[in-house]
Image (spheres, coloured by chain):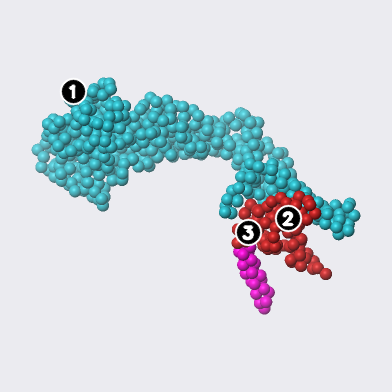
Amino acid sequence: MSPEPTSLLQGTLDLLILKSLIAGEMHGLGISRRIQQITGGTFVVKPGSLFPALHRMEEEGWISAFWGESENNRRAKYYRLSKAGLKQLEVETKRWGRVSWAIAQALEAS
Amino acid sequence: MPLRVKVRSFLRNLFLSRRVETDLDQEVHSHLEMLIAENIRAGMPPHEAQRAARIELGGIEQVKEQVREEGIGNWLHSVLSDCRYGFRQLRKNPGATAVMVFTLALAIGATTAIFSVVYGVLLRPLPYTDSNRIMAVFEVNSKRTWSRLADPNFDDFRDQSRSFQAIAKYNDYVVSVSGASQPTRTSVAHVSPDFLKVFGIQPILGRNFSAGDAKKGAGPTALVSNGYWRQDLGSPRDLSQSHLKIDGAVFSVIGVLPAGFRFPADVDLWVPADLDGENPSRTSHNYDAVGRLRDGVTVEQANGDISAIAQRIHDTSSEQGDYLLKDGIVVPLQDSITGKARPALFVLLGAVGFLLLVACANVANLLLAQASVRDRELAIRSALGAARGRLIRQFLTEAFLLSLVGGGLGLRGASRSVFQYLCSRSCFPPRSPPASERSPPHARLPGTCARASRKAGADKRVRKAPSALAGLSWRRKSRSHWFSWSEPDCSGAA
């Protein structure tokens, strides 16, 4: 049984998108499903948050977009990680590590 | 690299907005279709699959709007539409708009006019190397009146003072000059040999005056201004054949000064002073004097130095009386020219500053009156979701458009008259760069409103300056320094 979907934490969406694109180029739905899969169904990204984030990240130069054919021969817009995006992934990973460590510390404190 | 990507996205959002829109539309639609296909694969009937997909997507237009909000440079679109609405609004009330534009044009013009004078005359340094070290030297008599220098007194200042690297005397007259392309009445300065050294300049062609040129009975020599060399002599590289008949005597041209150097104002020829010998009187005040301070010497030290020499002369001279100097004074050359006009100028600046405030208050009142009529429009816009900040921005945009038009209108009239003014006078003294002498100022007008208004003001300034302000100068010379000083600023300012 998958856990109840949770709304995304501020700032984690970019990290998750970058992380999911490590596996290779993907279209919007693919990214959405991939995030759902790698978070064990905890996070479900709605198109209303996904597309703005994708376009923003494209404008930042972290990912690049191109039109391609989907697995069942539909035209779809694909996204691919850029060099700058790879670097950004490292930055965000480190930051998330710090945040989660700090939260864990805070919760353990008595 | 990311910067390049950002710039590209910005430009694309700006100029290819239609393509960006289609792209977005296709992307969202293809997403929807894939969702439907996914649902059908999962075993839903087509109708149900479509419904579920639409629910998951959450509204095509909403998604697109959310994406648009994130886009780089989309603020520009909203600014443009603000401008468009603002412009319509202004056109709807032509009467009020005209009044506001006129008020603003008048006030901005006046303020910038006076500011241009203040800037050109008081704030902007003279165009010479280390111009703040160039001093004017005067005699002070027993009635505390300042005057020019008598020959023997200047010689004593020059020989005995330790404060100056170079000190020179000069005066100028308008005389008949022939020998060039045509006979003219030309302004000629009589200067002592160190004159150019004081200003830190060298002839660009030929040589400077030597000590020998200034000796009594030496062959008459002359330096010419760059403009005179080009226009009246025909720019000869070889000066050996250039001779000028100045006031009846023949002078050989020995050098050409750099473009832009014309001190005293409007002078075209410089010749050595006292070729017929000095006037031995200590009370014939025939020459102005300028000096360049030695490094490390302050104005106060130079003053003490000159004072001491002056008092020595006073104590030992046989020519006692009201006209004999009792003291000497050293002031920066710039201050000596602006003199007593300084406080008056600042008072004027303050006055027009208030004028600007009054104008702003008037325009604000008119805008307020208009806004009260626009209650309905505002209510509708905020009901449709316009944020408070957006509405405020709309009003600011309208005010900005108003001032832009106001400044622009002033500019139009001004640039034409500045052009005429420049055509009617062809010479510009100390601070004008040569290129600006004959080029119309609007040829290089900067685009911003503020500067535009400044330029607009420049015109009024040059027209008022000579008549209204010349009288404030404490120098009694007939030719006004104001004239020459404020002028280049109108052409080369900013």
Image quarter hosting the C terminus of chain A? bottom right
* Residue at the top extreme of this rendering: B182
Is A91 magenta? The answer is yes
| A26 on left or right of B349 | right
Q: Secondary structure at mark 1?
A: loop
**How many other residues sit within 10 Å of disc 1, few (<14), some (14-19) or many (≥20)?**
few
The hue of chain B in the figure is cyan
**Chain name for mark 2:** A
Q: Secondary structure at mark 3?
A: helix
Badge 1 is on which residue? B248
**Chain name for mark 1:** B
> Where in the figure is residue B380, as x and y percent of width and height?
73, 41
Identify the amino acid type marked 3: Gly
Q: Which chain is red?
A: A
Badge 3 is on which residue? A85
The residue that appears at 17% across and 30% down in the rendered structure is B220
Above or below — where is A61 with respect to B418? below
Image quarter hosting the N terminus of chain A? bottom right
Report how many numbered discs are placed on residues in the image: 3
